[in-house]
Amino acid sequence: MAMIPGFEYDLFVSYAHADNVIAEEEEGWITQFVSRLRAALGMRLGTSSELKIFCDSNEIRANSRLPELLLATRKSALFLAIGSPSYVASDWTRRELATFVEQNPDLSRLFMIEFLPLNSDERYPSPLHENIRLRFWKSSGPRNLEMSLSPHADRDLFSSLIHTLAADIGKELIKRRVLHPLKAQSWIGEKTHEAVIIGGSDTQLARPKKTVLLAQTTEDLDDELDQLRSFLLQHGDEVTVLPSSGYPQGGDAFKSAFRSDLAQAELFVQLLGKRAGRMPPDLPEGYTHFQSESAKSSTATILQWRHPDLDPESVLDSDYKSMLQAETVIASGLESFKLQILKDLRKGKVSVRPARSSTVFINVDDKDLEIAKEVERECLQNALTTILPMSGPSSEAVRNDLAENLIDCDILIFIYGDTTQDWIRGQLRFFNKVRPKRESPPKLLAICSGPPPKADIGIHFPDAHMIDCPSGWNLEPIKKLFSEFAG
């Protein structure tokens, strides 16, 4: 029996046999993929003996085998398609997909990876074409040709993707096992501490989760969206991520599916790129604009993101420029934005953020870059955008960059360690010169002096916080200041 009651198999793997190639390696690609996925699922679920995966290993298919495969499809709780041009060309894989969808209209049971991308004139059968898929291929070589990832040569990336997929599938398996009244025993409760434990005098209730809706993005942000989704799924005990599968791309169908998810969401997250994206005839306002406007009319809190290098003034579309400049948009590094989402979710109530996250400028000489990097890591832990000085010899560009950072930053930190007294005095004088151009004083101005012991700088600002570490750098005073001023 499978883990999921009522099914013979927990997962059906649908693939084209032409993709289970054996080249330099002893086993075919699909064979190695399934073996690693099985191991990753076993580690995440805490059991491998109960897990049943159906993967047809017969290399030569006969028509008499098709009924057997379709029966296995009907008896499987979840379905994993391994997409490729061969998959699209195969009548057998299309039959397997159609049979599963007919039996299980709930598309949260459907998963997909891509062994190789389709050619420009090809399309996956519905609903796979709209489904979120992990890319197990990369562009490589002098002609940037698409090649499937090698389980050995691309070990780190391959393993990361396997565990991302295992996390998604494992979450769905746990949910379906917990929801079944006959099998929701302490096996799940003890492993996750979030299921209801049935069968004893004490009932352990699930810890409330927050539901996050990740908006569909333009294609240039697919990698960032995958990274964000993977990050949130790592915190599956705190967060439920929607959509569970991709949205249909027709206007009315998209609107209906998106609004259904939005009604469940407490937080709407949208990544914004250089362009607003597609505006098809049946959705003339465009996918990006529709999602944003719908979120404004909902009860969900809105968090939007753009890369700090994206200047809204460079955008010609006036409506999209306004969207990029909205108060709900955070301009920061993606890692900082991830932490900001988690930080807000853990507050118990999600708050609207300002137009960008607080920016920290760490003014440092090349001799003290090591300690500056330590401070930078602390900034990222506090979801703060961090800027270091431009490197290179002194020039007008370097001086202009320094001036802009001193004028625009919210938090300003000077590092005075192995550098000279002449350097720190020059930097402080220059800051004092450009200071009148600031719209407001820095939220925090700190001068951090470290080893070796040194003479007094001789320049003092009444609002500056002095951190003196003559015997060795200590980040605790800096962490304390962040907790007071950067919260």
Image (cartoon, grey):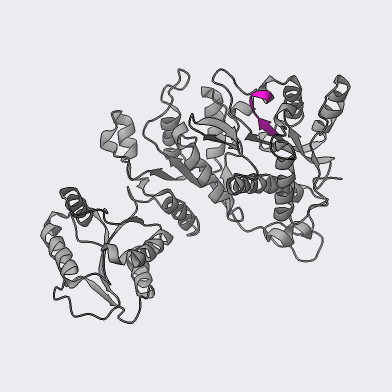
Q: Is residue 383 above or below residue 155?
A: below
Q: Which of 411 and 303 is in front in this view?
A: 411
Q: Where is residue 129 in the image (x, y as percent from the top left)?
A: 60, 26
> Which residue reaches farthest right?
64
- For the N terminus, the image quarter is top right
Residue 148: image quadrant is top right
Q: Where is residue 327 in the image (x, y as percent from the top left)?
A: 33, 45
Q: Is residue 367 above or below residue 136?
A: below
Please indicate whether residue 166 sits to the left or right of residue 303 in the image: right
Residue 299 visible, this angle: no
Q: Which of 173 and 138 is in front in this view?
A: 138
Residue 96 is covered by the magenta coloring: no
- Residue at 33 percent across and 82 percent down: it is 471
- Residue at 70 percent across and 50 percent down: it is 40
Q: Nearer the viewer, residue 296 or 280?
A: 280
Please indicate whether residue 172 sits to the left or right of residue 4 in the image: left
Q: Position of residue 347 (x, y in %)?
A: 47, 60
